[in-house]
Amino acid sequence: MDGRDGIPRPVKDAMGRVRRGWDFLRHAGPSQVQFWFIALAIGIAAGVAALIFRLGIEWLQSTLYGVDDPSLLASFAARLYWPWLIAIPALGGIAVGIIVHFFTPDGRIRSVSDVIEGAALNDGRLEGRAGMASALCSWITLSTGGSTGREGPVVHIAAMISSRVANLIHADGITGRDLLGCAVAAAVSASFNAPIAGAIFALEVILRHFALHAFAPIVIASAAGTVINRLAFGDVTEFRLPGTTTVEFYLELPAFLILGLVCGVVAVVTMRAIFYSDDLASAWQDRLGLPNFLRPAAAGLMLGVIAIWFPHIIGVGYETTSLALTGSLSAEQAVIFVMIKVAALSITMAGRMGGGVFSPSLMIGALTGLAFGLIATGLFPNQSGSHTLYALAGMGAVAAAVLGAPISTTLIVFELTGDWQTGLAVMVSVSMSIAVASRLVDRSFFLTQVERRNVHLAAGPQAYLLCMFRVQGLMRKPTDLGAADTEVCLEMIEKGVSVNVSATLETALPRFEETSAEFLPVVRRSPETGTLELQGALFHVDALKAYNRALAATAEEEHS
């Protein structure tokens, strides 16, 4: 029987069920089986995006450098005519500079730190225009000789995919963050053929919690990303170790403790070198009055000059990492390569050229571990295992300290090498490295990046949630019920006791502690007269209620 609008009742009932199911999926999806299908779709999309990005880098490297096997780029570059070694990174820097100038408002390449910030402060959403420009810049950087890694851009590209889906279905904050975790897990898994580490990385680094409701969809997405990788490259590990690696457990473990301490220091030096180089480059840019688009070009030129003598700095650096893991370098070579790689990484990042820090940290860690291992096994040959085991442990220790991710980094080292027999040595080194580095920086490279933008994620939700509430949205206007007395507000303004209408609770709550006031006048400076105009009043109780609700919601999400 037809309804009043002419639509048959069975059709109307079906449409109603679809609408109710869609609303249910949007608001309660992460705990329901239906949501897993979205996670699977995002995992496939993110995996394909990571695969395309990787193949795109290899294609452009082959085109520009004329190398048949991009994994042997460093060896090929050593025989390349030297003007090309300078010209290719410099031209890549010019292209990056032009893109950054026109498509990013602040001349900054987006990276993993922006994904972490989006998860914490923006319901799992990221900006699209600057993000796409950053992905393009990172592709050009890695293809033309930039000394960074591909995992950062891949994570950011995947996050943009999840942001698009979250906006399409109007997902709430929890759902948006879970979608983000799914995309990141799939991207990491597809990049490194590491499904376990991909899932844990999304929880440990991006979402920064291990809530059960997020685990199943993230694992599904991570598995999907791994399938994409294996369909393209087969079930092979990224690095192959020679023979077996053994540990003389009781006698040799103290050496891995010391290696962890050394790697922690190396990781801190690497991170601080990057930040110092960025500050130095900004200072010189301001002093010389250089436009933003010339900054990547200058960095590319410097990289090209270094590559004439040290071609191993070009690109991701997996060839040199493999040489370290197989013990094909001397201790002297390993130490020199570490110093040059840190310098090249700092130049690339300071030049705002794009790329990530994970692959470089693997390379730096493997070289550090190899140098340490060669010295240790040389001093105590009868009490030591293979020096390549130290390279493996060092690779995990430096990477864990840089990423601030001891669990996922330990797992990804195992999955990259296929060597699960040396877990104790790697775990010991990682634990000591992370203990040292986390006390000398703001937990990790990514969180320190965010802290440098004056966003306090490293301290936890009790700190960064204050930035999310603006005084303007919480104040009581003079016409509202229960508003503050206008005369009292004006008297307080005269005494200098007030808060700006554009401020957040990060500014307002300390003012309450300083003044012991029940409320603070909210003011705005008039653009015409320059005087302070009363807009309303922020009551202490209203601020605390909003803050407590946000803390409760965060705790509920993390323990659900």
Image (spheres, grey):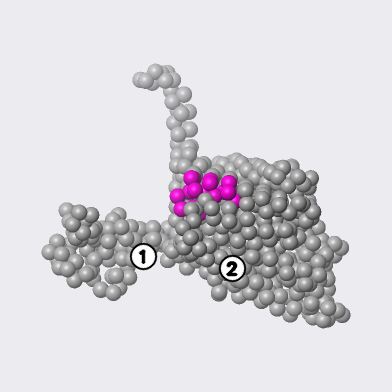
Dot 1 falls on a residue whose secondary structure is helix
Residue 100 highlighted magenta (yes or no): yes
The residue range painted magenta reads 93-111
Residue located at (24% from left, 61% from top): 522
Residue located at (45% from left, 34% from top): 19
Task: Give the residue type that dot 1 points to.
Answer: Glu
CA neighbours of label 1 inside 10 A, class few (<14), some (14 to 19), many (20+):
some
Name the image quarter holding the N terminus.
top left
Q: Which residue is mark 2?
A: 273
Task: Mark 2 or mark 1: name the one nearer the start of the chain.
Answer: 2
Front in this rendered view, residue 213 or 97: 97
Q: Which residue is mark 1?
A: 506
Q: Position of residue 559 (x, y in %)?
A: 50, 60
Res. 228 image quadrant: top right
Q: Position of residue 544 (x, y in %)?
A: 32, 64
User: Can see residue 517?
Assistant: yes
Q: Position of residue 168 (x, y in %)?
A: 48, 39
User: Can see residue 413?
Assistant: no
Residue 158 highlighted magenta (yes or no): no
